[in-house]
Image (cartoon, grey):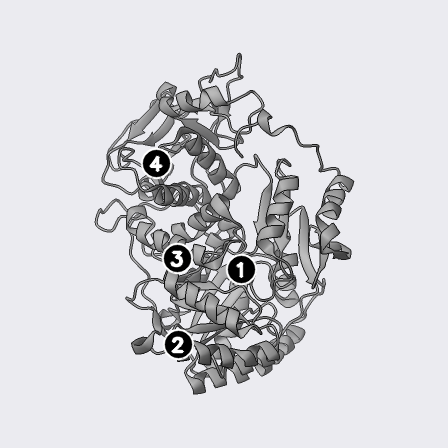
Amino acid sequence: MKYCDSVYRYQRRLTREVVVGDPHRGGVIIGGHHPVVQQSMITCDTMDTAACVQQTLDLVEAGCQIVRITAPTVRDAANLEQIAAELRRRDCWVPLVADIHFKPEAALEAARWVEKIRVNPGNFVDSKKFAVKEYTDAQYAAELERLDEKFTPLVLLCQQLGRALRIGTNHGSLSDRILNRYGDTPLGMVESALEFARICRRHDFHQFVFSMKASNPKVMIECYRLLVARLNELGPDWNYPLHLGVTEAGEGEDGRIKSAIGIGSLLADGLGDTIRVSLTEDSPHEIPVCEDLITLTPRLANTTVHVPELPPSFDPFSFERRATPEIELPRVVAHGSVPAVRCGGEQTVRVVVTERVFAGVAPKLTPRSDLQPEAIYEELRVHEVDPRSDFTVDEETQLLSVRDGLDLAPILAFRLLAATLRQRGCRNPILLKDTLHPAELHSPRLTLLHSAAVIGALLADGIGDAILVRSEPDPMAALRLAYNILQAAGCRSFKTDYVACPSCGRTLFNLQTITARIKSRTDHLKGVKIAIMGCIVNGPGEMADADFGYVGGAPGKVNLYVGKKPVKFNIPEVEAVDRLVDLIREHGKWVEPEPRTATVGA
């Protein structure tokens, strides 16, 4: 199966055109040869017409081309009429999307007023109970008939009114039917979406796009790749556009890094027709990140340079780290005797810095600092090559990298290096670089996204035993960025990991305030993963790999989870953070924080 024409050469996947709204009056066309469309979602109560209108106008001013609004009930869906009318009265014709979960009748109401409907296959018809059940073929077929009965009216109405659909699968909200047959897997997500797509096609309705969102960038990448490969197998007329996004990415640098890894790597492979960056921040902040990722795509992928089309070294549909021998890196002495670290094999991915960065950070570090340089680039015995040339390798334990100054995008170059080594039967460990042209610095905003997209994409391919960040000029920022990329890619855990959803009209508390409050109490818990969810739509599922969860259960009330199991219910919001700390303590994962001066930047 193939998900793109070449993993070494950029060629955008050609898709059907899906029209959303009137393109002559503010609408957009997703797919085809049209530019990638950027979108976002407002966060206020859908019944507050004035607030919805103002937030939509703010997003449009920021450059948003499609605006999504949640419609949790029929009453909310009906109020979309007022929101749309007021926007049009103000000469704002941006397409509106109704976000639907659990309520097919709300979707039917919303389709009367907005240009596009997003349905979640995991909960549009099914109520998710995480029930373990064996489905016979007859029972499974009966479930599909029930799905057809509930979904077909919406398809027919969208066809009649000229509306578009997004079939938006989420890793955290697959139906029990899918979970029991396919598991919580990329295959399950793909099959869940295809069930809905087959109904659309049976009625000759093709105005829809797919999305395969997950909070884990590695899972998200695998899902989209598998979906495209399956669509390719089904035939050329299954070339539907893709909406890309890492859901519940979080806030600040962490949210941007996760999004860059997931969205940036797929854009570099030619996938993606519309994108949304999900940050736990005010929605207009998402749009510049979308713009930057689209701008960076030509830098991430070669469009003109041709290289040998070797079989890739990685399985694009199932993560496995490339096998290498272990080697010892030269000792870094910053605070007395520091043990040398090993690289490759079963070792964690190591952080290498330049002499300049080391000189800049060494005076600020203590032996207990979370961020430590683990090798100095200029002191490594690293063999740097042009992967297109007939290079030689003296021994399998020699550390390899790509030579600076080549006319190759880094993702392509390191994929080609790994493929060449595989073809020769060599297993040398590889040092990844975020740039092959360190003198060409980007703006600080672009630097973070570029470094994360390049290194994160390769780590998601299973390539890389050590990383070197050189695009960031500030020494401490460069060291922090390297560690944050490894954490976001799931390679290391040096600090508390947070899965935090963006706010929307379903949210039952102020996500930004609560996230900041939880972080202030827990950001010293290395290796602990905490999910912060505004409601239960994706909460329990997206928390499947989190240790603890803080989820809005009702207005002013919070439910606490261990994994995806709720253990404390209806806790008053004013007490909930303290109770979360108590829960962490009960499960033996709490440690008392040290004075802030004892460590440097997390």
Of 26 and 549, which appears nearest the observer? 26
Q: Quadrant of residue 429?
A: top left
Residue visible at 49% across and 23% down in the picture: 364
Instruction: Give the mark nearer the N terminus: 2 vs 4.
Output: 2
Cα–Cα span, label 1 and label 4: 36 Å
- Depicted 355 relative to depicted 589: above or below: above
Question: Are there few (<14), some (14-19), or many (20+) residues within 10 Å of tag 4?
Answer: many
Residue 16 appearing in the image: no
Instruction: Give the mark nearer the N terminus: 3 vs 1.
Output: 3
Cα–Cα span, label 2 and label 3: 43 Å
x and y percentages locating residue 162 in the rendered image: 41, 83
Three-letter code for the amino acid on which mark 4 is drawn: Ser
Q: Which residue is mark 4?
A: 471
Of 596 and 19, which appears nearest the observer? 596
Q: Residue furthest top?
A: 336
Mark 2 or 3: the one toward you: 2
Left or right of 107, for residue 266? left
Three-letter code for the amino acid on which mark 3 is drawn: Tyr
Three-letter code for the amino acid on which mark 2 is drawn: Arg
> In the rendering, which numbered label is found on residue 112?
none
Question: Are there few (<14), some (14-19), or many (20+) residues within 10 Å of tag 3?
Answer: many
Badge 1 element? helix
Q: Which residue is mark 3?
A: 3
Q: Which residue is mark 1?
A: 187
